[in-house]
Amino acid sequence: MIHAYALVTLSKGIVLPGLSRRTGKPCRVVSTRQLVVSIRHDEVALEGCLDPRGHGFRVGIREIKTVQRGLIEHAKFMGPRSLIMRRVLDLPTALDYRTGSPSAVYYSLATMDSVELIGGWGDAQGNVTVQMLPICGFLVPTEDPVVAPWRQLGHLWPNGQFARPSGAEVVSFVRQAGVVFAGIMPSSIVQDTEERFAQTWGEVWRPGAISEEALIMAEKIAQVSKPRKYVPVTPELLRQAAKKPLLHSTGVPWDYAPTNGYPGRKIWRNGLTREGVAVPRDDWAVAKFFTNREER
């Protein structure tokens, strides 16, 4: 039995894989500073979120793994029939949340801390599209730490699904906040992603162990950068947050729109730029998505 619902306000915007308001399937990225959660005994479950315009969305994550200390700014407890709760709870979901993936978790940076990265997408017809986009959301092996270094399994793209990353690992975000939110992905999303990658690239897409170079570099960076603290999201944490005033930070960008007027956006399709120029083989970050695909 669910005992309570709450609207949780974050001090920074994050991104989540959003579900279609019609079909309940992953279809977009949602920027949010307002999470809708349910509380059952000692467990807090993520039911969905509100975007910057107050529209409700179901999301592809139910279980929150951890958040950066200070991320939860305020909480307001509400009934299931309140207007805000209904914006989310009345929406469909086509996901099975009962089984969390044993192989991958989801990490989000703050929207203001997005990083420009290259990722690839293969469709059922064998076409491959590669883009450089600002990325905030990552699919990461379950055993990897929240504080870098960690490996990249997928980049959350604007279509709400994951693209194959060009790079294998993230060593550090230097002075940026790094990961601010971590959640458990449903097995169905991870399995679909892995099958889609394997269909296009075979098993070559899977990253190996974290390199020794990355571990050494991360250790050196950690010596001069204070490590961030992380806390689990519990009913007690929300009760404490409910006692705080709602500040609503102003002037902080948190709406994530990577394809709208983004001047640095680059696209390659089946090995060609939009101008029809072939990708040089020495541009390995891009060429790797198109090299020897027929030999897999």
Image (cartoon, rainbow, N blue to C red):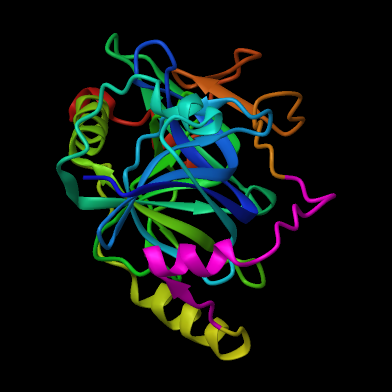
Task: Tell me residue 286's x, y (percent).
Answer: 49, 36
139 part of magenta stretch:
no
Using the image as rendered, state which of residue 59 and residue 101 is in the foreground: 59
The residue shown at (34%, 41%) is 61
Using the image as rendered, state which of residue 166 and residue 190 is in the foreground: 190
Asked if residue 71 shows in the view, the reply is: no
Task: Tell me residue 262's x, y (percent).
Answer: 73, 30
Using the image as rendered, state which of residue 118 and residue 19 is in the foreground: 19
State the count of labels: 0
243 part of magenta stretch:
yes
The residue shown at (38%, 28%) is 290
Instruction: Check the picture and name the quadrant holding the N terminus.
Output: top left
Q: Is residue 207 above or below residue 24?
A: below
Q: Is residue 53 above or below residue 14?
A: above
The residue shown at (60%, 36%) is 133
Q: Which residues are magenta?
A: 227-253
What is the chief secondary structure element of the magenta stretch? loop
Instruction: Describe residue 189's horizontal placement relative to residue 8 as left or right.
Output: left
Task: Tell me residue 160's x, y (percent).
Answer: 44, 28
Q: Is residue 177 above or below residue 81?
A: below
Using the image as rendered, state which of residue 183 and residue 126 is in the foreground: 183
Task: Tell me residue 170's x, y (percent).
Answer: 46, 61
In the rendered image, the residue lying farthest to the right is: 251
Instruction: Check the picture and name the quadrant holding the C terminus.
Output: top left
Asked if residue 293 shows in the view, the reply is: yes
